[in-house]
Amino acid sequence: MIRSERTPWRTAGFHLTALGISLIFAVPVIWVLAASLRLPGAPPPTDIELLPDPIIWSNYVQIFELLPLGRYLLNSCVVAALAVPFTVVVASWAGFALAQLPEHVRAAFLALAIVVRMTPITALWLTRFLVLNELRLIDTYAALLAPVWLGSSPLFVLIFYWSFRRIPVDVIESARLDGLGALAIWRRIALPLARPAIGAVSVLTFVQYWSDFINPLLYLKSESRYTLPIGLRLLQQMDITSWPLLMAGVMVMIAPIMILFVLAQRAFWVEVRS
Amino acid sequence: MRTHTRYRLSLYLLLTPFLAGITLLVVIPAGLSFALAFTSYDALSPPVWRGVQNYRHLLADDLFRRAVVNSLTFLALTVPLRTLITLGLALLLRRPRRGIRLYRAAVYMPTVIPGVAYALIWLWILNPVYGPLNLVLGALNLPTAAWLVDPRTALPALALAALFQIGEGFVVLLAGLQHIPDDYYDAAALDGAGRMALFRYVTLPLLAPWLFLVIIRDIIASAQNTFTPALLMTGGGPYYATLFLPLLIYQTTFDRFRFGEGAAMTTLLFAGVGGLIMLVWRISGGWGYDDSV
């Protein structure tokens, strides 16, 4: 906007506003970190403190003794890590096919994608359970991983579709004249050109399965297969008054996501800009 | 010509896993749900046809009515507020400046927090005795509240928590703003347009399709994202003050095994969300939205 208007006062005002807003959005996490380091069972603080005294790191050890959180953590990692490659393959295949198929197929797909996005997940809980039960997948990781067959989200298919659309038609044409099939063109030409899309979809997929609470809640029965979100729910049900331990559990759940988010930052905003 | 057909065929093959997924996980479950709504079914004995009995029963059911009213109240509170906040932040943080990446990251951060963790964080923040929110309000000599424990404030408190997970809409609007050429602003400014006029006649009309997308997404999200917070933070209480449709559907089907009734509620929820979207579409005339956005 009218850049000449940028006076020092305006700049200072902008930074003050932006900083204040950033603080409001970030402060809950700082509070949680502080709460997770407090002595369990001690009287809760009566005023805001940034760091408790003394700092009790052992809360983070204790929660792993109260519950097999280590096991749940591992399960979550396995599910999220398996989901990423499957999602990238299914979503990029679909995105590639859509970018190459004629207009009317694409229009039909886009309509379908919008309806799928519109469908409330609650609408499918029960009957998806019945379908998975029929396929004997209840209480397996396959039930948690089932959404990879949709590319995990229609959005991911669209992300790939958009980046494959940018490949010049001539490049594909000459590859076909060289006798390459669809699969070979996807693997040798399309995928290497879609690295940013692969990165973005991988991060988003990992976060989606790592955070997934409802699918394990509905489709898992054996405790040994529980994932971290269910573990957190169990921790909450064990003893509601032990806030420091519960908040330590929350930190264990969100720390990997935060780290991933910070690492992926650069790539992420580049993708947004384009 | 033959190779052309073969290529086309192999493209459809690449699309197959996705289409299989849609069929198995969306189309069949949605169809089954629609059919089960006309039956009484407990997953043990085969379903019994009951016609529109489930629907008739629901319309007279106080709990169901309560859940509908609560869900609509939540929607009416969160969708406009979330949209305004998202728009304001996108406008504020649209230009590349020093530190802009940090500010944007801070705004996006609550969105990446998993639902379970987010609910537990807010359960702590809203604790009436030693939650940080009341401590801050007390320190500023502002009135405090019992939040989730008080039937009058429980639903607004959940709405408050929902105001901070706006990252996706924020990204969409930032992308939309980047599509508006600088020339438009320069030309309008030359014609003597002030800041408000620029917003009213340049930014808003060009951003409208993106805004429409954000509002639609928000209606869908607000209609279903109440499940995890309601289950973990209030259990639907106190006195059903936060009983939303998704929670009632969950309790009806998975706790009480009334699959038919749950399916009927689901169908009504789907119809309701669809109806709301149609309404927004009608009012806004689509705002020039098309699938390319």
Image: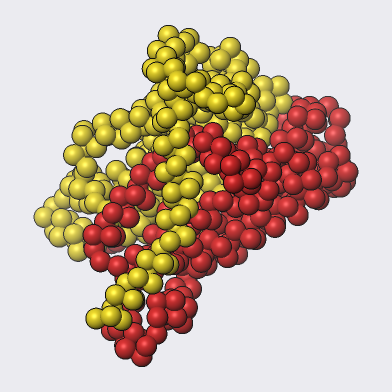
Per the rendering, the colour in which chain B appears is yellow
Q: Position of residue B9 (x, y in %)?
A: 35, 70
- Name the residue: 18% across, 59% down: B184
- Name the residue: 34% across, 76% down: B7
> In the image, A18: left or right of B182?
right
- Is the residue B290 above or below the residue B54 in the image? below
* Residue B88 shows in this picture: no
Q: Chain in red?
A: A
> In the image, A84: left or right of A12?
right
Q: Nearer the viewer, residue B207 or B268?
A: B268
* Residue A48 shows in this picture: yes
- Name the residue: 70% across, 57% down: A78
> In the image, A262: left or right of A222?
left
Q: Position of residue A178 (x, y in %)?
A: 36, 90
* Figure quadrant of the C terminus of chain A: bottom left
* Figure quadrant of the N terminus of chain A: bottom left
- Name the residue: 28% across, 54% down: A108
Residue at the extreme bottom of the image, as rendered: A178
Q: Position of residue B258 (x, y in %)?
A: 56, 21
Residue at the extreme left of the image, as rendered: B191
- Is the residue B227 above or below the residue B151 in the image? below
- Is the residue A180 above or below the residue B236 in the image? below
